[in-house]
Image (cartoon, rainbow, N blue to C red):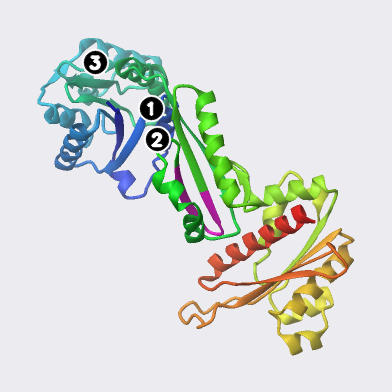
């Protein structure tokens, strides 16, 4: 039988957006590491009825339910009561848990504790207590014919300690878990999500182990390969076989994997080829140079940058002839090529990247035709290499897309040079 898990994050502060639920990410990673499938994640506020409803639904469909939060000493900490009701149990006071709570307070310099802390020493009848030496909220495990409900604190440091020291070892023993789940992400910035889906859609639909999924970001699409196996070597082999199929269908489209960034990959290529770069950007707000400047190679590969939002800036800072701009327009191939050539000459860089375009700042009245941006690279040959790229929408969205596309075009030209 396939064991499935789900998470329930309890706390109104999560629903109000006052804090970010980083616990779910950590717990998901821990479950992946032992090969436990995580199918659902629910967030619910501090409301007794809704907590009970979520718990009952989760316990009926998942063999492992992990809750975080709601086991403190206050009136709105309702997890223990609702777990008891959802599993048909009463709450029972555990003196040894109370002794531990008092010891924690004494170790922190408190001579007395509030009476409501006694609440934390109650757990559902028959539950396995989870002692908490790093906090004042003990957890517990209810184990019945449906599976287990594991309740631990929402405080991240306490949650992590109890997951590693108690919860993960318990789950491995309880369900005989010996495998692991491992993922690898292939990153693409050249073509859109729908196009990738068209190319590898059959792999997404027909593959069960490993599975393949897509995740779109602004200017980038991630292809996630996830394998489940009894050991890491087998998982790596399954992932490698699927990766080879995907790369065969997307030749030169994938710029990196996992933690790679497009700007980091471009910077590494420039350094490896002993090339330097200077950038002149007219409609990206300096975003290309900003991205490159965050890479470890920045000081050795980035010779300079100029951001020009207006015609006057293009003329005065780069020396692009005003007549050319008047004749072809600021967003034109000729201006992009002049920008690339002149920033290269001004800085002495091996390559010059010129980006010439305009933005639609009036977001209430978008143009019928998306503005065109011209991206030119000088220094790869006797003449600049220029491509055009049309993209409309919100200014911040467009700037990111253009910056990513500029870096992707540069990457492709460099590896094919």
Residue 203 visible in this rendered orientation of the protein:
yes
- Between circles 1 and 3, the one closer to the viewer is 3
Residue visible at 74% across and 70% down? 386
Which quarter of the rendering shows the N terminus? top left
Left or right: 26 with respect to 304? left
Residue 70 position, x and y percent, is 26, 33
Asked if the stretch drawn in magenta spans residue 162, the answer is no
Dot 2 or dot 3, earlier in sequence: 2
- Mark 2, other Cα within 10 Å: few <14 / some 14–19 / many ≥20: some
Residue at 72 percent of width and 73 percent of height: 308
Say left or right for 290 vs 10.
right
Q: Earlier in the sequence, mark 2 or mark 1?
A: 2
Circle 2/circle 1 CB separation < 8 Å: yes
Against 91, is 61 above or below? below
Q: Who's the residue at 38% across and 27% down the image?
A: 159
Q: CA distance from mark 2 to mark 1?
A: 8 Å
Question: Any magenta on residue 220?
Answer: yes
Segment colored magenta: 212-222
Helix, strand or loop under label 3: strand
Residue 137, by quadrant, is top left
Judging by the rendered image, the residue that carries numbered circle 2 is 23
What residue would you read off at disc 1? 159
Location of the C terminus by quadrant is: bottom right
Residue 234 to residue 241: above or below: above
Give residue 417's mark. Answer: none
In the rendered image, which residue does mark 3 sit on?
A: 128
Q: Position of residue 123 (x, y in %)?
A: 19, 20
Query: Is residue 68 in sight in this rendering?
Result: no
Please, what secondary structure does the residue beneath circle 2 have? Answer: helix
Q: Main secondary structure of the magenta part?
A: strand
Classed neighbour count for the residue bearing mark 1: other residues with Cα under 10 Å, few (<14), some (14–19), many (≥20): many
Q: CA distance from mark 1 to mark 3?
A: 17 Å
């Amino acid at each position: 039988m396939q064991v499935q898990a789900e998470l329930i994050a309890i706390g109104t502060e999560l629903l109000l957006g006052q804090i970010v639920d980083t616990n779910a990410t950590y717990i998901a990673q821990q479950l992946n590491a032992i090969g436990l499938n995580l199918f659902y994640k629910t967030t619910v506020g501090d409301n007794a009825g809704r907590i009970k409803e979520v718990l009952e639904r989760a316990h009926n469909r998942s063999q492992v339910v992990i809750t975080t939060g709601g086991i403190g000493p206050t009136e709105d900490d309702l997890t223990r009561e609702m777990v008891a009701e959802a599993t048909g149990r009463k709450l029972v006071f555990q003196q040894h848990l109370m002794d531990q709570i008092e010891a924690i307070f004494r170790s922190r310099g408190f001579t007395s504790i509030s009476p409501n802390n006694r609440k934390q020493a109650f757990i559902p009848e028959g539950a396995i207590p989870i002692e908490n030496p790093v906090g004042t909220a003990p957890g517990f495990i209810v184990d019945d014919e449906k599976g287990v409900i594991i309740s631990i604190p929402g405080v991240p440091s306490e949650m992590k300690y109890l997951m590693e020291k108690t919860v993960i070892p318990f789950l491995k023993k309880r369900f005989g878990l010996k495998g692991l789940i491992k993922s690898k992400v292939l990153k693409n910035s050249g073509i859109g999500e729908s196009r990738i889906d068209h190319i590898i859609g059959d792999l997404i639909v027909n593959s069960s182990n490993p599975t393949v999924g897509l995740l779109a970001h602004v200017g980038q699409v991630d292809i996630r390969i996830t394998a489940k196996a009894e050991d890491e070597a087998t998982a790596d082999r399954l992932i490698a076989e699927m990766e080879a199929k995907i790369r065969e269908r997307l030749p030169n489209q994938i710029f990196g994997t996992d933690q790679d960034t497009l700007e980091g990959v471009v910077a590494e290529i420039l350094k490896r080829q002993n090339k330097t770069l200077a950038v002149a950007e007219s409609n990206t707000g300096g975003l290309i140079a900003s991205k490159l400047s965050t890479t470890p190679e920045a000081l050795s590969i980035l010779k300079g940058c100029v951001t020009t939002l207006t015609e006057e800036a293009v003329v005065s800072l780069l020396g692009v002839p005003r007549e050319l701009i008047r004749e072809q327009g600021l967003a034109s191939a000729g201006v992009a090529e002049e920008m690339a050539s002149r920033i290269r000459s001004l800085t002495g860089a091996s390559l010059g990247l010129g980006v010439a375009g305009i933005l639609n700042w009036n977001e209430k009245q978008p143009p019928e035709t998306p503005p065109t941006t011209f991206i030119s690279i000088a220094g790869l040959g006797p003449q600049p290499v220029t491509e055009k790229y049309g993209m409309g929408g919100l200014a911040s969205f467009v700037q990111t897309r253009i910056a990513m596309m500029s870096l992707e075009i540069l990457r492709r030209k460099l590896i094919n040079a």
